[in-house]
Amino acid sequence: MPLNHCILHKLERSTPGGDISSQLSSEETNSSGPIFSLFEQLKHSFQRSAQKQFGHFDSSLEENPLPQWIKQQQQESISFISLSQNLVSDLSDKLDSSEDAFSAHILVALETVMEQQLLYVFWLEHSEALYIDSNLEVSTSSFINSKKMHYAIKCQLSEWLQEDSQKYLSMITSRGNKVLTDAFTKSIGFAVGVDVKSETKEFLNIVSEFAAALPEEQAKDYKEKIIDYCVERDSVGEPVVIKELSSQLNEAAPLEFSSFVSDKQETPLAAIHTDRSSLKRFIRFFGRDKDMSISFSSGRFGSDITFDEMSGRLTLNEIPKSLRQQLNKHNKPQAAASEQQEDE
């Protein structure tokens, strides 16, 4: 997986409402050593993130120069350095409409994986940490937390340039700052192309329908295998390939599940991206408030656990051993106090 190109730039507004200063590098970074390690960490965090959106470049935007710059770079009419500088300068212009203070390094990288070219853009911020120096003094140090990703994109260039796809572009944005999020989204020209939650809901409904025709234990096993496969694919940033999943479920009848899914889908899809939170809710029920947290496997519902919709009462016919022990310990002092009061 060669890292073909890599470069770092910096954008900063030191005080709210102040001017944005930019530091644009005129040379690429050596793509080996620490920068490669950082890129791999960032890429891994991006792949594992459950916050990704999948889409494409918005052709309706009047000011969306990034796709043209990428095409020019691919045609070698501009350099990778120029592409990255143009991208960061445009991002600076978009951020100029806000007043928020920020300090970020922008890492732009071009990677080749199995003859497929991938363009990454990462927004990096430093965090502070304390350490003890050689003089036994406590000092402050800055570091890049690669697991805390605010803004990033991944563009599958081959898929974009060669296919009519609506999901070659994936993006992560921060929920904490709408102004910066809007500026980053506009600079990239991102448009949502896949309703991941809707696709996941349709898929899980089909899974439930398929499992309903199976014996109880087999249905439970099928559901667990399907969810495990989906979560594993999502954790590496890859879509669920229906035929591959089908063959893993039943080697003797490898097309049984995929044929069932294809017949039930409104628009048959060979692969889908899934929403991780929806997958978790499919196999577990959970909820919490400030005084209570409840979570249990959906396989227990209807047997050990029942719910009365009219009264809103949840009945647990079997509870974990550790919880039973805690309740027994809690009841003993209360029972002793009650007996003492009766004696008095």
Image (tube, rainbow, N blue to C red):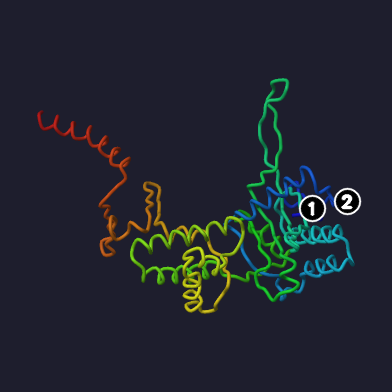
Side (left or right) of 137 relative to 331? right
Residue 156 spot, x, y in % from top left? 71, 65
**Residue beneath the point at 37% across and 46% down:** 291
Across and down, in percent, residue 129 comes to 66, 35
Q: Secondary structure beneath disc 2?
A: loop
| 70 vs 264: above or below | above
The first of marks 2 and 1 along the sequence is 1
SS of the residue at dot 1?
A: loop
Q: Are marks 2 and 1 in contact (CB under 8 Å)?
A: no
Q: Quadrant of residue 87?
A: bottom right
Q: Disc 2 designates what residue?
A: 27
The answer to whether residue 12 is above or below residue 189 is above
Q: Residues within 10 Å of mark 2 (few under 14, many from 20)?
A: few
Q: Which residue is mark 1?
A: 20
Using the image, tell me which numbered label, if any, was put on residue 342. Answer: none
Q: Residues within 10 Å of mark 1 (few under 14, many from 20)?
A: some
Locate residue 192 relative to residue 30 in the image: left or right: left
Residue 229 in the image, given as x and y percentages of width and height: 52, 59
Depth check, front residue: 292 or 195:
195
Q: Is residue 343 above or below residue 185?
A: above
Pair 2/1: label in front = 2
Query: Which amino acid type is shown beneath numbered disc 1?
Result: Ile
Front residue of this view, candidates 163 and 148: 163
In the rendered image, which quarter contains the C terminus? top left
